[in-house]
Image (tube, rainbow, N blue to C red):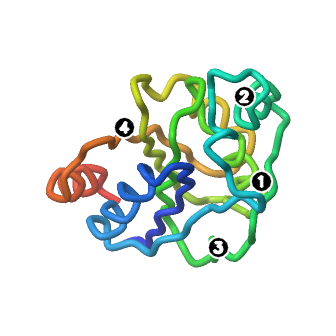
Amino acid sequence: MSKRLVAYFSASGVTERVAKNLAEAAGADLYEIKPKVPYTNADLNWNNSNSRSSVEMRDKTSRPELADKNAKIADYDVIFLGFPIWWYVAPTIINTFLESYDFANKTIILFATSGGSGFGKAVEGLKPSAPQATIKEGKLLNRTSLNELKAWVESLKI
């Protein structure tokens, strides 16, 4: 069996709940991707074009700083990488995370939470940040039970 990590970014707690359940289902370690400056509710107001998240998502070169770089990526073969979908893609902090470590020869399986959209261009937007990794679109896991998560992980044959 491969050594597995569930790494996730959660701005509001939704993705965090899913990540914890996925780690249990996959027999994986858990790592939270935290911004150096936490997001406030005002930062996440997508109706405000001047909110932090809106400004970051308009600028594809935006790389919010991480609170730490303590993930032991070298210890893992498979990384489940989770995030909320923002503007049909991954938040740019996910690019920061990928660019902060060596993911060569790693398999990255994406999972996401969303209020209504699919993965959109998330995979396409992340591949340049980890060019030597295999990045696979996984699933939207908004309301997935532990048993459903276990079945999904089993179906991946990793």
Amino acid type, callout 2: Ser
Q: Which residue is mark 3?
A: 71
Q: Nearer the viewer, mark 2 or mark 4?
A: 2
Q: Residue at x 81, y 56 (%)?
A: 65
Q: Quadrant of the N terminus?
A: bottom left
- Mark 3 element type: loop
Task: Decide if residue 122 is on the left or right side of residue 17.
Answer: right
Label pair 4/3, CB-CB below 8 angstroms:
no
Q: Is residue 113 above or below residue 1?
A: above
| Residue 101, image x, y percentages | 74, 63
Distance Cα–Cα, label 1 vs label 4 = 23 Å
Q: Which residue is mark 2?
A: 54
Distance Cα–Cα, label 1 vs label 2 = 21 Å
Q: Quadrant of the C terminus?
A: bottom left
Q: Which residue is mark 1?
A: 99
Q: Residue at x 47, y 71 (%)?
A: 30
Distance Cα–Cα, label 2 vs label 4 = 22 Å
Q: Which residue is mark 4?
A: 140
Amino acid type, callout 3: Ala
